[in-house]
Image (spheres, rainbow, N blue to C red):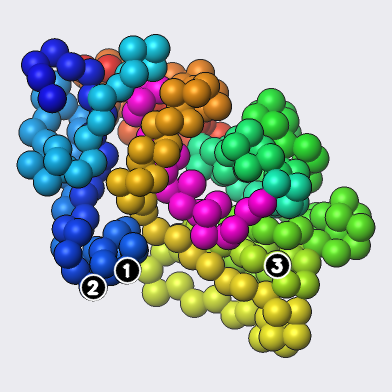
Amino acid sequence: FSVGQRVVAANSAPCGVCYYCRREQENLCEDLLFNNGAYAEYIRIPERIVNKNMYEVPEHVSYQDAALVEPLACVLRGLEECGVRAGDTVAVIGLGPIGMMFVRLAKAVYNARVIAIGRRPTQLDRAARMGADQMVINSEGADIVEPVRGMTGGRGADVVIEAVGLPELWQLAIQLLRRGGVVNFFGGCPSDTHVSLDTNLLHYSELTCKASFHHSPALIRKALDIISRGFVTAKDFVNRVEPLTNLLEVMKHLMSHNGHLKTAIIP
């Protein structure tokens, strides 16, 4: 690297030598080095991250585009863990920024058929623009299982992604699967949360339950390549731009409002 070079640094780097790293599970590294707190004009990147997980940004990729590599890499891990193949039906529960990334990647990169499930018509409209093939509104008391089964020949989805983090939606995700299907509980529930699942359904329908955490250097590189090729751009996910001086107001606004995507903070 050289002075003046445009780069993007991930927020972590694995050690490369521990039990998990040797088994290609770098996201679970026993000495995973994090570097959080980038709301500043300058930030010091630890040497390990520079060596293992920092990359030059292609000339045609903007800083806002490059800033999406970390969440995008996490979403990529979720899809890879589920073994999504072209033609699979992927149902995505939750249409916030992460859910929208699942919709976009499942359709544009994996060539899957996508069913988007959200609470607001505006979210469903946005999901359609992201490439979702069919939409289901999850209003209070609505039946979600039958519409999804009706869209899948009565079987259910091949893969279900829960991208909210609510126990009742973890339970719903299981009900939306076909026999032999895979669910990814991507949305983390609050600490000490316990979820009851239908063990009869899990066993006799041979369902696979997955959960995915974080990313790896290989997935960061793949995410940057996907952005470089134009499959994902900031204009799809960034709907506000604010200066660093407005950070506190931005955080207060995000905590009190739902339905927003990403806000770009410009130093």
The C terminus lies in quadrant: top left
Residue farthest front in this picture: 22
| Separation of residues labelled 1 and 2 (CA atoms) | 7 Å
Residue 248 image point, x, y percent: 26, 29
Residue under label 3, please give it.
181
- Residue 194 part of the magenta segment: no
Element assignment for label 1: helix
* Residue at (66% x, 58% y) in the render: 160
Q: Residue at x 46, y 27 (%)?
A: 227
Toward the viewer: 251 or 81? 81
Which is nearer the N-term, disc 3 or disc 2?
2
Answer above or below: position of 99 versus 148: above
Label 2: which secondary element: loop
Q: Is residue 77 above or below residue 181?
A: above
Q: Which residue is mark 1?
A: 23
**How far from the left and from the top, in percent, is residue 241?**
38, 16
Position of residue 70 relative to residue 60, above or below, is below
| Type of amino acid under label 2 | Tyr
**Label 2, on which residue?**
19
Q: Position of residue 216 (x, y in %)?
A: 33, 51
Indicate which disc, 1 or 3, sits on the residue closer to the N terminus.
1
